[in-house]
Image: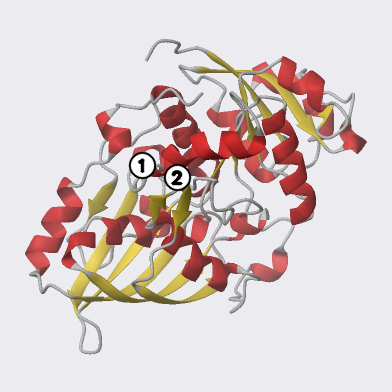
Amino acid sequence: MMNRHYKVGIVGATGMVGQRFALLLENHPWFELTAIAASGRNKGKTYAEAVEGRWKMTRPIPENIRSMVLLDAAADAEELVSKVDFIFCAVDMPKDEIRALEERYAKLECPVCSNNSAHRLTPDVPMIIPEVNPQHAEVIHAQRKRLGTKRGFIAAKSNCSIQSYVGALSAIWDLGVEEVAVCTYQAISGAGKTFEVWPEMVDNVIPYIGGEDEKSEVEPMKVWGRVENGVIVPATSPKITAQCIRVPVSDGHMAAAFVKLREKASKEEIIARWRSYQGRAQELRLPSAPEHFLTYFDEPDRPQTRLDREIYGGMGVTIGRLREDPVYDYKFVSLAHNTLRGAAGGNVLMAEFLCAEGYI
């Protein structure tokens, strides 16, 4: 790892994920925030002015970003990329517009670490969880060929809903994961909301989150897919069925998962695999990597959202309640922080990985 200092920008800096990026980059050992952008209506405002009355984090606005002046994400693209080595992108726009904007940045030779769903299923755009599918970064070479770039590319962050159970299943992948049924119980910050602006969620559960069931069934198949001829070919198994439910919790997505295995394994063997599992992020000792990707609790009432979502700075996944199941083989509960591991934090970790491996 030669260069450990990178200038970075945040596109979509005023939104909830953008705010989380601002906090994560405040004292980052490798990344220095040098540019921020948002929609045209905020152009020319300082960051503090733009987020006044809209700051949703519990920590205050970082000093290094308060007086930074916002650029227009689209109109000022050239100026933005001239100030940075790569960008984090988390914008609220129609998908076709996001795809066009991210490709424009890439063609301006600026790598894009995207938090948006627009390019997640593009075959030569890797959707990287460094502990699970680091080998997918290989397709960046083919993507650059397609885009006609030397440096620019797009890498996408997978959906927040899949973080907890995909990691847990990846650690037992070689036992032959054949069928998965999962229910996710998702925090309101996943909708970019707090209880102050969404009082209807207090004492309430909503059994529908637009598009999430589909993402939770489709995206894991790409994460578990194989690289072939410069694209990622999605896995054809396991079969996954998912239901995603909005619950009155500020942060933290929980999953109740049921799994059928081809190879029978004891409960003790599965727990041992979870506890010993290490990925590329841990091997490289990346700044945001949790010491343990997966943490298993023996207590019957863990993980709990409020107690466990912040483990390893919100970058760890917690698991509990593994037991045999009369319909499937096993069932368990898992938890991941949706705006840290599941969004901005996972994206920062992906960027660290891409820098460490020489793609940025």
Left or right, residue 310 beside residue 259? right
Q: Secondary structure at mark 2?
A: loop
Of residues 289 and 333, the one nearer the viewer is: 289
First of labels 2, 1 by sequence position: 2
The residue at the point 64 percent across, 49 percent down is 116
Give x and y (percent) for residue 126: 49, 45
Report which quarter residue 270 is drawn in.
Answer: bottom left
Residue density around tag 1, few if under 14, some if 14–19, many if 20 or more, within 10 Å? few
The image shows residue 48, relative to residue 129, as above or below, that is above
Q: How is the image coloured?
A: secondary structure
Q: Nearer the viewer, mark 2 or mark 1?
A: 1
Q: Position of residue 282 (x, y in %)?
A: 28, 34
Q: Which mark is residue 135?
A: 1
Residue with the most extreme bottom position: 327
Distance between the alpha carbons at the discs numbered 2 and 1? 9 Å
User: Which residue is located at x 77 percent, y 54 percent?
Assistant: 96
Q: How many residues crowd around disc 2 within 10 Å: few (fewer than 14), some, or many (20 or more)?
A: many
Whether residue 15 is situated above or below residue 21 in the rendered picture: below
Residue 39 lies, in percent from the top left, at 84, 38
Looking at the picture, tell me which residue is in the foreground, 213 or 208: 213
Q: Closest to the observer: 317 or 177?
A: 177
- The reply to whether residue 348 is in sight is yes
Residue 128: which numbered mark, if any?
2
The image shows residue 108 at horizontal and vertical percentages of: 72, 26
Q: Residue at x 72, y 43 (%)?
A: 15
Which residue type does callout 1 highlight?
A: Gln
Judged left or right of residue 343, residue 329 is left
In the image, is residue 240 above or below residue 276? below
